Amino acid sequence: MKMNELGLVYFSPTGTTRKVIMETARNIDLKSVSYDLSIHKEKKPNLHFKCNDFVLFGIPVYGGRVPATFLEYFETLKGDNTPAALIATYGCREYEDALLELKNEVESRGFKVIGAGAFPVQHSIVRQIGMSRPNKADLKVIADFGIQLNRKLRNAVDFNNVDIQVPGNNPYKKYGTIPLVPKTDVNLCIECKACAKSCPSGAISMENPKKTDKKKCISCMKCVYSCRKKARYVSNMKLNIAQKKLTKVCKSDKTAEIFM
């Protein structure tokens, strides 16, 4: 099958999922176009792909599920029996129903999943878990995933008989995120609005960037990482509680799982 171009559709508030999807894409012999859905957009972009395109979908796992904020953009997503591959990154706990949910969502919109991978990475909140992952060994596995996808694209006439199975349960587990809403140190905040501009869920107002809408916040930590003045932070008490809880259930030596 002669392919057209590679679409990269991803959600990566802290940049880790982007790193994984870019390393995968680097090993696929197609010109790529990126659709970074990590910044809140009132007007949803049209995500329409042709039958001879190839699309990589990448998400971080939130509580064993696909981030609800990412799925909001699927209102405009449409394929034409378009081949696709899935990437889920997770903070060394479990990815549970995320890959299955993502597979069902993209296939219901006209895509054919020909490969999937779940990759353990550094936890976005408790950074000691999975420290510095993806590391050199992880990147080699991720690159090989891209090589396998590239080979599959080159050798296939069509993908009608491809049936990729991924783990997960349906109905999915109840959606939820770690309830850690970052606070603002008003003495350090200069109201540059970098946090508001970068917030993927629109939880920070451009008019008053010192405040966060707790109902909209998804605890992705992007505002914390984007604040150059370090005015954005999570309370030490809540962070310590989260660290104790997550340290018990996360294992930093988790290995990638590939489904081809």
Image (cartoon, rainbow, N blue to C red):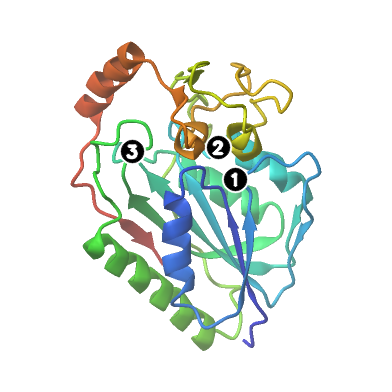
Q: At label 1, which amino acid type do we have?
A: Ser
For disc 1, the marked residue is: 38
Q: Does 90 sit left or right of 30 as displayed?
A: left
Q: Is residue 220 among the parts visible in the rendering? A: yes
**Quadrant the N terminus occupies:** bottom right
Quarter of the image holding residue 111?
bottom right
Residue at 48 percent across and 56 percent down: it is: 18
Q: Nearer the viewer, residue 165 or 87?
A: 87
Amino acid type, label 3: His
Q: Does residue 167 lie above or below 46 as drawn?
A: above
Callout in the foreground (2, 1): 1
Question: Which comes before the other along the chain, label 2 or label 3?
Answer: 2
Q: Earlier in the sequence, mark 3 or mark 1?
A: 1
Q: Earlier in the sequence, mark 2 or mark 1?
A: 1
Name the element at disc 2.
Answer: loop
Q: Residues within 10 Å of mark 2 (few under 14, many from 20)?
A: many
Q: Which residue is mark 2?
A: 67
Residue tagged by mark 3? 123
> Relative to residue 106, is residue 248 drawn left or right?
left
**Relative depth, front residue between 49 and 132:** 132
Q: Position of residue 132 (x, y in %)?
A: 26, 49
Q: CA distance from mark 2 to mark 3?
A: 15 Å
Q: Amino acid at mark 2?
A: Pro
Above or below: residue 61 compared with residue 17: above
Tag 3 secondary structure? loop
Labelled pair 2, 1 in contact (Cβ < 8 Å): no
